[in-house]
């Protein structure tokens, strides 16, 4: 269970922001405001303004100003009029969507990640099911009750939350917005699929987690939030908690098109702080790994670092959210019953990567709410690549320019993510997960009489480094494979023999039959089968590329 005990109390933040919007510059005629100089006669100035512009100005007497519509030439004439202290183009301001929930002004994280700025009013979004794989949820909570579509316990009993962790996560994503109650969740159209996997002892069995992920995806979840995990330590296998069962559950979710979001974990579970490796399942391919960022833009020492699996950072301190009412009732003198200001000591205030992850899940749900046909890898790439780079200039002293191990691509930006949908979308890949040989590879069948097959797909250095395709060859059959990346990038091809179990098995590199070696845009391999069977074609991105790399693979089989 990812969770941190802390003592610092939530601070109060001011009102949500306003977004300044300039009226379009292109218009020939525009509206201007003129300030009257001290002692100037408003009547005389108004007459002069009308003479040069041809339009009678409006009088903003109480403000000592006039308003007039004129073109570029009239605008220049206004400069010559005596008695005018200043002239400015009339500005139009628009309120960012401001929820009426009374505790919303204290949700500093919603301001920091620009959760509502994309919209001037409550946005029309398609409903999106979001799974919360956690300690359950306070099912009757007035801010959550109507947002829960399904709830199931995988540890016996009901999915009712008695610990608080899951109710905090659920509130960040989906607390009822604009209901004049409590807080405002960040995903207005999210429907919660609640899976309780934390036992009464506070532990999480991987089996329960794996079953829950599968159930949630089968129940229609398009986003799966996993704010829990196990230690990763590539230098010490005894300590490393990698699980094939967990990997299979994540692969199942990816195959079914779900966006899997997981906390990279906190160092309170690690031997040292800071800890240099993201936890599982964040450290699995295709999972969007989320770290924490502080109010000052720094990377808190508790937030695990990782060169590969830390994808994005979101606020991870003072996360005001919902909390089980049965637990807050133990502090009857506390005013905010059902919310974290009345939580147990462990969660007052909530802190940790556990509560950063649901902010990312909420943005994923919003993106799918705007564009339900987006694929999971597109949602992931949009969130990552629209993040605001964290650097020493933004308050993170240790953060390098560009992607770094503290914050991944940087700080979550909900408004930039939604805005990115207006531009070219990241490439799709309909064959995932296909990250290894054996059963994981995508089998390419050739229609009868066809010699060639073409595949359009994509790879990403951090989330999806390998695509593996299985091709059946009869004895002495020839195979020609070529790959052309859509952008200049380091893509390599390898061909593996039948019986290969894993393309990353260093002990069995003898099974690797061919590696492309031709430098340039197109990589090729050719082979004549010695033995019949399923051969594996591996496409690998061997060096970082900022955008994900789309590619075209052609596979030709001849006698
Ligand atoms: Ca950075
Ligand atoms: Ca791929
Ligand atoms: Ca990842
Ligand atoms: Ca892949």
Image (cartoon, helix red, strand yellow):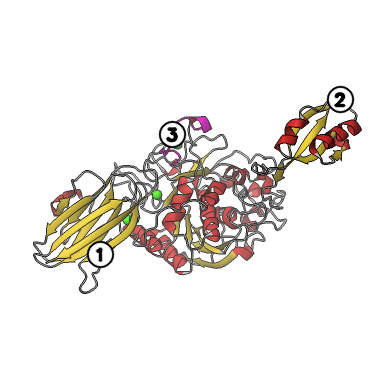
For label 2, the residue is: 38
Q: Nearer the viewer, residue 543 or 156?
A: 543
Residue 359 in view, yes or no: no
**SS under mark 3:** loop
Residue 397 sits inside the magenta stretch: yes
Q: In the image, is 245 to the left or to the right of 365?
A: left
363 to 546, vertically: above or below: below
Q: Nearer the viewer, residue 292 or 447?
A: 447
Residue 510 in view, yes or no: yes
Residue 294 sits inside the magenta stretch: no
Tell me the number on the disc at residue 401. Answer: 3
**SS under mark 1:** strand
Percent from the top left, x then y, of residue 424? 46, 52
380 to 318, vertically: above or below: below
Classed neighbour count for the residue bearing mark 3: other residues with Cα under 10 Å, few (<14), some (14–19), many (≥20):
few
Q: Residue at coordinates 38% horizontally, 54% vertically from top-left?
A: 286
Tag in front: 1 or 3: 1
Contact between marks 1 and 2 (CB within 8 A): the answer is no
First of labels 1, 3 by sequence position: 3
The residues tagged by marks 1 and 2 sit, at their Cα atoms, a distance apart of 80 Å
For label 1, the residue is: 453
The region drawn magenta spans 393-408
């Amino acid at each position: 269970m990812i969770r941190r005990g802390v003592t610092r109390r939530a601070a109060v933040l001011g009102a949500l922001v306003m977004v300044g919007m300039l009226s379009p510059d292109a218009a020939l005629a525009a509206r201007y405001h003129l300030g009257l100089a001290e002692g100037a006669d408003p009547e005389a100035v108004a007459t002069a303004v009308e003479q040069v512009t041809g339009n009678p100005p409006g009088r903003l007497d109480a403000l000592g100003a006039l308003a007039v519509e004129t073109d570029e030439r009239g605008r220049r004439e206004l400069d010559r009029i005596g008695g005018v202290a200043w002239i400015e183009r009339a500005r139009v301001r628009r309120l960012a969507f401001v929820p009426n929930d009374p505790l919303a002004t204290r949700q500093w994280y919603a301001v920091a990640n620009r959760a509502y700025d994309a919209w001037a009013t409550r946005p029309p979004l398609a409903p999106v099911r979001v799974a919360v794989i956690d300690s359950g949820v306070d099912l009757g909570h007035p801010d959550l009750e109507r947002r829960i579509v399904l709830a199931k316990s995988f540890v016996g009993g009901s999915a009712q939350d008695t610990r608080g962790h899951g109710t905090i996560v659920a509130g960040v994503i989906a607390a009822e917005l604009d209901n004049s109650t409590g807080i405002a969740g960040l995903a207005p159209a999210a429907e919660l699929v609640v899976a309780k996997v934390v036992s009464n002892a506070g532990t999480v069995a991987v089996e329960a987690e794996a079953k829950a992920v599968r159930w949630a995806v089968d129940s229609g979840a398009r986003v799966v939030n996993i704010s829990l995990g196990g230690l990763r330590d590539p230098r010490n296998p005894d300590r490393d908690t990698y699980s094939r069962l967990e990997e299979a559950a994540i692969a199942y979710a990816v195959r079914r098109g779900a966006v899997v979001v997981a906390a990279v974990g906190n160092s309170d579970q690690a031997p040292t702080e800071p800890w240099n490796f993201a936890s599982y399942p964040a450290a699995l391919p295709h999972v969007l790994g989320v770290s924490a960022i502080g109010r000052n833009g720094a990377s808190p020492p508790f937030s695990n670092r990782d060169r590969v699996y830390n994808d994005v950072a979101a606020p991870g301190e003072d996360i005001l959210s919902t909390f089980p009412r049965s637990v807050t009732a133990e502090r009857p003198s506390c005013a905010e019953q059902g919310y974290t200001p009345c939580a147990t000591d462990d969660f007052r205030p909530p802190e940790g990567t556990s509560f950063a992850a649901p902010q990312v899940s909420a943005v994923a749900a919003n993106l799918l709410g705007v564009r339900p046909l987006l694929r999971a890898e597109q949602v992931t790439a949009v969130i990552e690549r629209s993040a605001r780079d964290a650097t020493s200039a933004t308050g993170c002293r240790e953060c390098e320019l560009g992607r770094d191990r503290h914050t991944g691509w940087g700080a979550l930006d909900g408004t930039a993510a939604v805005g990115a949908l207006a531009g070219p979308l990241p490439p799709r890949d309909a064959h995932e997960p296909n990250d290894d040989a054996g059963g994981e590879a995508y089998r390419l069948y050739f229609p009868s009489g066809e010699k060639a097959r073409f595949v359009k797909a994509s790879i990403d250095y951090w989330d999806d480094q390998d695509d593996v395709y299985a091709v059946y060859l009869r004895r002495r059959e020839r195979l020609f494979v070529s790959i052309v990346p859509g952008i200049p990038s380091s893509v390599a091809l390898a061909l593996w023999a039948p019986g290969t179990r894993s393309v990353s098995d260093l002990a069995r590199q003898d099974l690797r039959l061919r590696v492309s070696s031709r430098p340039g845009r197109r990589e090729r391999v050719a082979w004549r089968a010695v033995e019949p069977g399923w051969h594996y074609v591996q496409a690998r991105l061997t060096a970082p590329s900022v955008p994900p790399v789309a590619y075209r693979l052609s596979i030709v089989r001849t006698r």
